[in-house]
Amino acid sequence: MTNRTSVARHPVAKLAVAGAIGCTIASFYAPPAAAQAAESIIVTPVLPLGYDAYLEHSVSQQGDGEWAALGVPVESFVLFPEVTVGQSVTTNTYSSGANAKASAIEILSPKLVARSDWSRHALVLNASGTFKRFVGQSRRNEDVWDLSATSDLDVTGELRLEFIARASQLALNRFSGEVQLDAASVVTIRQDQLSASATYRSGHARSVVTAEYFNFRYGQLLLTDGTTRDQSNLNHDAKRLTGQFEYSFTPDLTLFTQATYADFSFDSVIIPTTQNASSSGTRVIAGGILSIAGLGRATVSAGYAWRDYDRNGLKSVSGPSAEARLEFFPSPLTTVTIDFGRRLADARLIDSSAFNMSYVKLRLDHALLRNLKLAAEGNVARQSYLNSQQVSRIQNALFSATYLASRRFELSGAISYSTRRSTPVSTNSNVDELVGGVAATFKL
């Protein structure tokens, strides 16, 4: 049997999987946000075997402990079924800058994870969805879902292969920064993904090569005047190749470097002044992670990105990016996380409309009891689009609580406030939304 560092065996990864199986309270109540759009350049290295014993775990990494679902053994798999039902209220159903309409939201979120219990290789299957029904405002109803399969193959003790196949439907609104100001509701996007990666480990060094393919299909966009807009001209493919190298000098210090090449190809030929033109680009980053026992952990990453467009009328863009994540552990039951930075990001998922994004985010996680978890978060972001005059400022605040009554049942509640201010000013450039609700989750 080879030593494993896969999702199924690595100690830290197992904690992350346990946390992911539960309901993510922040995403359940907060407005739809970007998925791949504002992709962070923060890299979290995987420590060599034996080093992870010295790693301090945040409240979220600790999982649910003795309140975690045990799952249902079926043949050589363990199934983790769950369903969440919730009721929330929003003050701005259509994310409108004027004449905002409030409505109640009925939410159903089923999920099923099947994880192999093999001694060597691993396979994880996931099916999940969140279905929202806006009372009295049916045209704002929202369905998102995700189907994925991840396989992990140990070729040798040093070489591991991973394959991912995913089909999902996403939803974005103006708080994510990728949606036109005249949109009256979310933008629905079908995303298909295939990826393959090879990881080679030798002593304290780790090298990873990853190839990814994405296909995006955009749904009809509902405008504020009640009409719809066809968005098929935004349909595109994205291909990405990434190479990464890490070296752990000690359990407390790991350095990494990463280089990425990406190609974006649109289905339709559109006018040169439109921002979504086919392009290619590269990005190089380097950084490290430093842990100080009893105090916290710092991850820092910096780099530079270039993007060239295929059509006249769009200038090539480039710029530096730098991000940092500081984690403090005042106690085993409290984690304070500070994220800040500036990066060249891609609008409309990994579309080719780029913007500079500067942000600061502060989050506090506290387990009042081992089965009663509180979280408070606040963030401020500024988005400056490189091929237009648009500048947007987004602020968000969130408070949530989760009570684990048993391995099979939990209660949660959250309230969030989001605001967006954009220039040049138009009818819907300024948006505010308050969302709050409660939910119950049943697990096996």
Image (tube, rainbow, N blue to C red):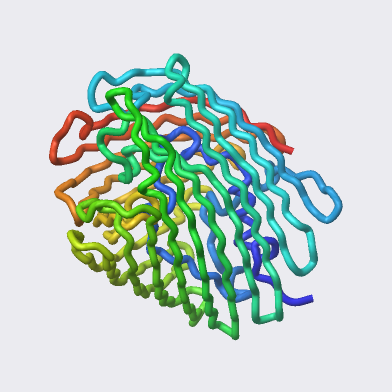
Q: Kindly tell me whether residue 146 is visible in this rendering.
A: yes
Q: Is residue 81 left or right of residue 246?
A: right
Q: Quadrant of the C terminus?
A: top right
The residue depicted at 24 percent of the width and 50 percent of the height is: 383
Q: Is residue 72 left or right of residue 201?
A: right
Find residue 378 and report its image quarter.
top left
Question: In this rendering, is residue 365 above or below 14?
Answer: above
Q: Quadrant of the N terminus?
A: bottom right
Q: Is residue 84 left or right of residue 354?
A: right
Question: In this rendering, is residue 372 above or below 61?
Answer: above
Residue closest to the far top: 136
In x, y percent, where is residue 24? 53, 41
Q: Nearer the viewer, residue 270 or 66?
A: 270
Residue closest to the far bottom: 202
Q: Nearer the viewer, residue 391 or 372?
A: 391
The residue depicted at 39 percent of the width and 44 percent of the height is: 232
Q: Is residue 404 left or right of residue 287?
A: right
